[in-house]
Image (spheres, grey):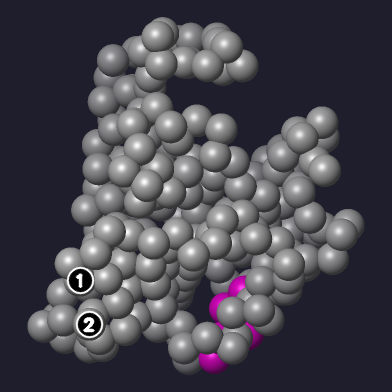
Amino acid sequence: MTTRRLYLTRHGAADAFGELTDAGRRQAGLLGERLAGLPVDAVWHSPLPRAAASAHELARHLPDVPVAEAAELVDHVPYVPSAAETPPSWAGFFDGYDDTEAASGQRLAEALIARFAKVCDPGAQGTRPGTHEVLVTHAYPIAWLVRHALDAPPSRWLGLNSANTALTMIEYRDGLPPTIVMFNDMSHLPPDLRWTGFPAGIRP
């Protein structure tokens, strides 16, 4: 059976300019140490600097694993819900999004699913029956991939937040629905580096 395992992670903590902080670099390095025990085939990252820097930081622990940019992983709003679909806590968040922006985000979301949310073609050059890929991206693309794996309505990406360098794993297999193996796992991080990227009131 052909199996594709995606290890999704949000970039490390970043400053207001989108650059990794010292804490973000530590988070990425610790995630790399955790992933070092896996047969990782590739590391893909968003074009944005905070994701690219996180990918290269964690890849220091994955010798000879190729690291490459994937445009589909860029930070974007994958689906703008209707008023009836929008929870009260999100009221006003989408004010100002016009139809052009919403359509652009939806195209990116569809491209993300088309590229990554499927089993790899076993006939493709260099493809093995079981692949392990790390995707360094942002909270919204992770939420969209989780929503898709659950076959949930489009608006259910709302509220599926991820902490910086938390690990989410989705497994794709021939003839079976996707399996979410873990979501927002931070066990590789010490307590002082967990839950960054969440509002302070949400942190347990």
Q: Nearer the viewer, residue 86 or 44?
A: 86
Work out which residue is located at the far right of the displayed protein and give it: 192
What residue is shown at x 47% (from left), y 88% (from top)? 39
- From the image, tell me which residue sits under label 2: 1
Amino acid carrying label 2: it is Met
Measuring from the top left, give residue 161's x and y in whole percent: 59, 41
Query: Marks 1 and 2: CB-CB under 8 Å?
Result: yes
Residue 160: horizontal and vertical position, in percent? 54, 39
Whether residue 38 appears in magenta in the rendering, the answer is: no
Q: Residue sitting at 23 percent across and 80 percent down? A: 2
* Residue depicted at x 60% and y 86%: 36
| Residue stretch in magenta | 58-63
Name above or below for residue 156 compared with residue 163: above
Which label belongs to residue 63?
none
Say few, some or many: other residues with alpha carbon within 10 Å of mark 1 (under 14 / 14 to 19 / 20 or more): few
Tell me if residue 59 is in the magenta stretch: yes
Residue 19, can we see it? no
Amino acid, disc 1: Asp
Using a 10 Å C-alpha cutoff, classify the residue at mark 2 as few (fewer than 14 neighbours), some (14 to 19) or many (20 or more).
Answer: few
Would you name the residue on which mark 1 appears?
Answer: 174
Q: Quadrant for the C terminus, please.
A: top right
Q: Secondary structure at mark 1?
A: loop
> Looking at this view, is 92 or 58 the one in front?
92
Find residue 53 and report its horizontal and vertical position in percent.
Answer: 60, 63
Q: Secondary structure at mark 2?
A: loop
